Image (cartoon, rainbow, N blue to C red):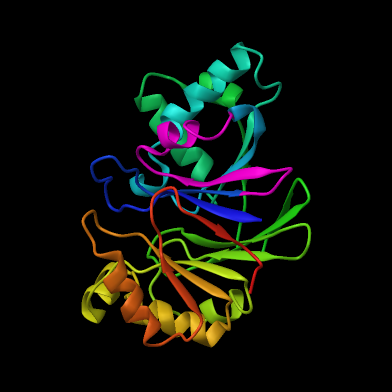
Amino acid sequence: MKLRIIGRSSPYAGPGEAAIGYVVEDADCHVLLDCGSGVTAKYLERYSLADLKAVIISHLHPDHAADLFPLGFAVLHALMLGLRKEPVPLYMPPGGVDAFNTVLDCFGNLQRHYSQAFTYREYKADDQVAVGDWKVRFDRVYHGVNCHGVIIEGSRGQRLGYTADTKMGPELERFFHGVDLLLCEATSDAGEHAQNTSHLTPEEAGQLAAAAGVGHLVLTHFLPGTDGEAKRRRAAQYFSGKVSAAEPDAVYAVGDR
């Protein structure tokens, strides 16, 4: 299993980049994990919608979900061209479908169009769903909105954890315990700002990785222009394992400890 960084920028995409979006893939399957602004175009540079197994949305903040709107039309186009035979399963948090449809109504009664592009599926905390041969689990994190962390388990038992957006909380260590790769937000540079905005500092990301005993920590969710290497060094003060700062289009193996 591999993780590709489509976009790492928040709360907006910097020049030539995309906001938050990732592809998790193996030889037989790939899913899109979050879909912020600019992700659809970047995704289509490397992937075919014919092979997209599912889209998983952690929460509906625009930097994580705004590109569902262009993605829906791209899927419709793929269906019209015969590149796909079925809509794409779209996994959203509780209440997400109604919220998405409300926005589609505001955009000009587009619910019918998008219901042809997507098969809507809502998850909740402690749910486990199957995507191909993979198992996908969810748990509520600490972001002040209906936001969920995700664990994707591959066919050989390799596991990728994704914090989505969160501040520190007592359940994070339990949920992400022992994952092979933890894709972890490291938005804030100061602890007070992290608490006030419900995000993590790089130091907290390192502490979480150490407490959870993960294999590889990949930091993400950076303001455009952020020095990723500086973030990496700060996290590495607290986690002795492998630490990377996400770079656009970078690919990381999941399960190679």
Percent position of residue 2, x then y: 61, 55
Drawn side of residue 32 relative to residue 126, left or right: left
What residue appears at the point 40 percent right and 87 percent down from the top-left corner? 238
Q: Residue furthest top?
A: 81
Q: Is residue 72 left or right of residue 90?
A: left
Rendered residue at 38%/55% (across/down): 247
The image shows residue 62, relative to residue 83, as above or below, that is below
> Could one spot residue 185 in this view of the protein?
yes
Return the x and y of residue 206 as percentages of the image width and height. Answer: 42, 81
Q: Position of residue 126 (x, y in %)?
A: 66, 65
Q: Is residue 113 left or right of residue 196?
A: right
**Above or below — where is 19 with respect to 216?**
above
Nearer to me, 30 or 242? 242
32 within the magenta span: yes
Q: Magenta stretch: residue 122 in it?
A: no
Q: Please state the extent of the stretch shown in magenta in the rendering.
A: 25-48
Between residues 111 and 210, which one lies in front from this camera angle?
Answer: 210
